[in-house]
Image (cartoon, helix red, strand yellow):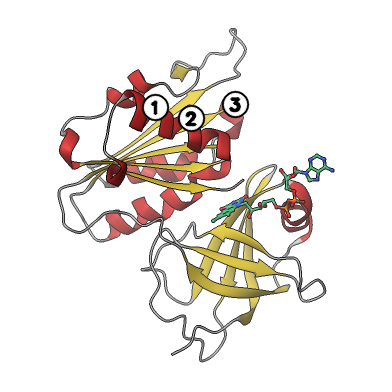
Amino acid sequence: MAKQIAEMLIESVNMELPDVKTLRYKWPEGYDPGEFKTGQFITVYWPDTTAYKRAYSLSSCALDRGFYEVTVKRDGKMGTRIVDWAKAGDKMFVIPPTGRFLPAFDPPGKHLICVAGGSGVTPFRGFVRDATRRNLDTKITVLYSVRTTADIIFNDEFRQLEKENPHFQFNVTCTRLPETDPWTGRRGRITAEWVKSFIGDLANTVVYACGTTELVESTEHLVLGELKLAKEQMRTEKWG
Ligand SMILES: Cc1cc2nc3c(=O)[nH]c(=O)nc-3n(C[C@H](O)[C@H](O)[C@H](O)COP(=O)(O)OP(=O)(O)OC[C@H]3O[C@@H](n4cnc5c(N)ncnc54)[C@H](O)[C@@H]3O)c2cc1C
């Protein structure tokens, strides 16, 4: 069956941070998304500006039925309109999920190292949610670069998932904290050494990178250039 573009009700919104909002789109009666996968993205647009479309990774997962969730940062025209203006009860058009940024859950036994910058963490919420609900023993390590502790999206949720899922670890590094800040976690940019410190079984490691082109390309350089992983062990999603 052809994938259908549908007008969907925004069922609820949640401000994750002052500049980051999660929207939940309710599937309309009779909607059939076809087969879709955790880690894919939907494309959305407003009924009054149908030519202006933007892609957003699902921050929900394929086990979630009846709705899609995306998490958007205030940035540019669509990002600002969504974060500042989208509210429950509004409607937007949604092009069904597509994309190849998929968690390597099959065959089992892989270690997924997920490198994210800023809002690039959104698909990894889907990865971890999916693995946790299915009790998979896939190891997932999120390495998350943010400017300050005030910029960590889904902090409470990831900490909770860490408690529920013994195979999941959430690690944050802050790049722009003042020295006087009491944060005891890691500081500085993501380095090859930091990534390497999480790699145990090299052959079964898959590194994911999601976010700005700069973050993704620098991670590719670290992983392929410095750590010498094979190309097949690296998956990227560039947001431009
Ligand atoms: C597969 C995929 C998944 C994505 N998933 C997410 C996600 O989950 N969450 C998310 O927040 N984003 C995500 N994005 C990014 C998203 O699609 C948009 O690119 C983003 O929201 C900005 O779109 P916009 O229309 O608001 O920006 P635009 O208005 O097109 O602007 C693009 C960029 O240019 C800058 N800009 C705009 N106007 C100016 C100007 N006059 N001067 C200088 N700079 C300017 C903006 O700040 C912005 O950074 C994803 C992108 C892709 C490709």
The residue at 36%/53% (across/down) is 127
Q: In this orientation, which residue lies closer to the viewer: 3 or 10?
A: 3
Report whether 161 appears left or right of 96.
left
Q: In this orientation, which residue lies closer to the viewer: 162 or 103?
A: 103
Residue type at mark 2: give it.
Ser
Q: Is there a contact, CB below 8 Å, between mark 1 and mark 2?
A: yes
The residue at 36%/57% (across/down) is 102
Q: Is there a contact, CB below 8 Å, between mark 3 and mark 1?
A: no
Q: Nearer the viewer, mark 3 or mark 2?
A: 2
Q: Is residue 143 above or below residue 231?
A: above
Residue 72 at x, y percent in the picture: 63, 52
Q: Is the residue marked by circle 2 packed among few (<14), some (14-19), or many (20+) residues within 10 Å?
A: some
Q: Is the residue marked by circle 3 packed among few (<14), some (14-19), or many (20+) residues within 10 Å?
A: some
Residue furthest top in the image: 180
Residues under labels 3 and 1: Cα distance? 20 Å
Residue type at mark 3: give it.
Arg
Label whose residue precedes the other's in the sequence (3 or 1): 3
Residue 177 at x, y percent in the picture: 59, 17
Residue 164 at x, y percent in the picture: 28, 47
Q: Secondary structure at mark 3?
A: loop
Q: Secondary structure at mark 2?
A: helix
Q: In this orientation, which residue lies closer to the viewer: 126 or 51?
A: 51
Q: Nearer the viewer, mark 3 or mark 1?
A: 1
Q: Secondary structure at mark 1?
A: helix
The residue at 52%/44% (across/down) is 120
Q: Quadrant of the N terminus?
A: bottom left
Residue 8 at x, y percent in the picture: 63, 78
Give the quadrant of residue 103.
bottom left
- Residue 147 disc label: 3
Query: Which residue matches tag 2?
Result: 218
Query: Which residue matches tag 1?
Result: 222
